[in-house]
Structure formats: structure tokens, C-alpha cells
Image: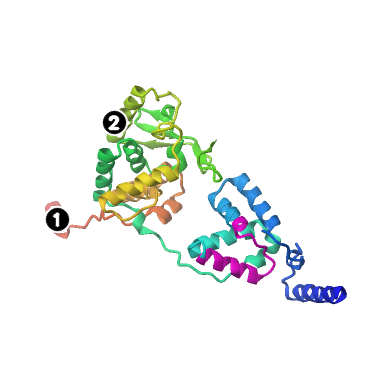
Amino acid sequence: MAVAKAQALSAQIWSDNQSGKFDRSLRIYQPATNGFDVALVERLRALGEQNRHRRTIHAYRLVKLYGKQFRSRSDTEEFITWMKEERELSTRTIVGILCECKRVCPESKQLFDHDLKYKKTVNQSDVLSKDEISRVLADLESNDPWYFPLFSVWLSTGLRNAEIRGLTWDCIHWEEGELLICKALLSDGFNAMNTRWAGTKNGKQRIVPISSKTKAVLQAHRAKMTEMELYQGDGLVFLTPRTHRSIYDDQIGKHWRRSLERCGIKHRRLYAQRHTFLSHALAMGNSPADLAQIAGHSTEMLLKTYAKPTGRVQLPDWQQLKTEKMLTA
């Protein structure tokens, strides 16, 4: 029986080699064992501890929770079915999980091939209209005053999530009316309560101007923090209301969703703050090059990602043009 098994395995290896499907890691030729795929789980854990990305950590937790090995394409199909039916994950999320598995097991990436497809669309609904912005800020000011300064500044500057979390008082240039964006406070994907400092996404400092209204909001916020003895010259601008620690997405996301629900506005993700600011700033006629510098993007990336409809359409007045032409004549 042992000889027969060895011959069958040798035949499979030879067939896979001839067809270009040979698994150099020998993963699919190993005997099955009970429990989760130790090698895959350990690689995902190591990558997650290195990059702290949520998608990697999500993949690590899912594969470990699934508790089975991956030795063939049929194992992957069962994993996909489990993610769809048991975990109710979207196709896009499932594709992302499988990409992470491929990433840590490049020698066995054919195991995680799939024919899943999802429609890649530009989510235009991320951008709030002028009326929606006014309603949300008015609601926050009345019903959630602790978070009103945060969302007011966020919608007025378009900072990235980690940049608004890591904004400190010494980076506010009051006289010049601008913010110095030179660092970011990243959340730990394993535990959102843990954070670490990092540079900006592109590694460069940049200056973001603020309006007089935004400056007034920040000054009022500083006065309140001083009154509560929470203000420090180099401390964080925005803190949690109870523990007075750094804010994190899951927490402020709840307050954002509640405000949208109270205003009767359909849900937008937190990153809508950035999309809203940059899309409206473009629609107002600002130079794409200037906005790209403020956003920390290339001009091409800015136009490709953030040039979305805002409702700020300036219609040409042909009658006025005709009148002006007659006057000049």
C-alpha cells in the first residue's frame, strides 16, 4: 500500500511538473493533518506584525478561524464558500483575503487562484453636497459637541485618517493660518487601542491652509481643552472623551454614522471627509497642482481619484457673453 501511494504521488508530481503546476513548496503533496494551516497562519501573522495592515491581519484571523489546511484548489473553493455563507463577506473582501494568502505563499499561489469577479466602480456617493455638509456640522455642534471640532477641521482640510489622528497643537501655525503635516498616528491592526508614530504616506512634509472659520473652531477647541486641563503645547489636538487618549476609526466612525442617520443622509465611510474636501475644492476652481500639493498626491492621482461630482456646476451665460462682446465692439 505504501509503494502504491508513493507511485501515485510520484505520478501526480510528474504530471504537475509537465503541466507547469508543480508546487515547489511541496505543500499540496504533504499528508493532511488536523487543525489549521500552520505555515500559512504563521506567515500571515508575521506579515501582519510587520506592516500592521488591516487586510493582512483580517486574513490571518480568518484563516486561523477557518481551521483547515489548503492543499488543493478544492480546499480554496470550500474556504471561499465558508467566507460567503458563514462570514457573509463581500466578493471584494474575499478577493483581498486570497491576495494576502498569495502574497505570503508565492510558491503556492496557484492554490489560491479563483474566478471571482466584482465590479470596480468609482464611488461618487463618497462626496457630500454643500447642504449635507451644513446639516451634518450643525447636527454635530448641537448633539455631539465633543466631535464637532474634529469633523469640522477634517471636512475643511481633507487630511488622511492617520494625519487627523496625529495632528498636534505645535503643528498649527496660527499667524499664518496653516497646518504643518509632517507625521501620522497609525492604528495597530491587531489592537486599535495601540498606535505608533510614522511619517506621512509619501514621506514628505506639506502645508495645508485653513480658513478663518476653521481657525476659530480650533481656537475654541483649544480653550475648552485648556479649561479641562487637557491642552499640551505638543499634545494631540483630538482626544477621546472619556480616556483622553488618541482617537481611532472605529470609535469616531460610530459618531459619524449616528450623525448621518439623524440628518437622514445615506451612509458614507470616514474617508468621505477627504473626498468631500478635495472634490469641492476642485469644483470651486482651485488649481489641481496646488490641491495635489496640499493633499500629498501627484496631480494625475488627484484628478483620477478625487475629481467627483459635487453639484457645483457653473453654467455659461451666453446672453451675458453676447452683451460683453457688443460692449467691447
> Of helix, strand and loop, which mostly describes the magenta segment?
helix
Q: Can residue 234 be seen from the camera position used here?
A: yes
Q: Residue at x 62, y 55 (%)?
A: 64
16 and 280: which one is in front? 16
- Looking at the image, residue 329 sits to the left or right of residue 20; the answer is left
Quadrant in which residue 305 is drawn: bottom left
| Residue 208 drawn at (x, y percent) | 39, 37
Q: Which residues are magenta?
A: 63-85
Q: Residue at x 62, y 45 (%)?
A: 49
The residue labelled by disc 2 is 216
Q: For the residue marked with disc 2, what is the amino acid?
A: Ala
Q: Could you tell me which secondary element the residue under label 1 belongs to?
A: helix
| Mark 1 nearby-residue class (10 Å; few <14, some 14–19, many ≥20) | few
Whether 116 is drawn above or below 174: the answer is below
Q: Could you tell me which secondary element the residue under label 2 belongs to?
A: helix
Q: Was residue 59 drawn as part of the magenta stretch in this picture?
A: no
| Residue 173 drawn at (x, y percent) | 38, 28
Q: Residue at x 12, y 52 (%)?
A: 327
The residue labelled by disc 1 is 320
Point out the image quarter for the N terminus: bottom right
Mark 1 and mark 2: span between their CA atoms?
39 Å
- Number of labels in the image equals 2
Q: Was residue 83 drawn as part of the magenta stretch in this picture?
A: yes
Among numbered discs 1 and 2, the one appearing first in the sequence: 2
| Residue 71 drawn at (x, y percent) | 70, 67
Q: For the residue marked with disc 1, what is the amino acid?
A: Gln
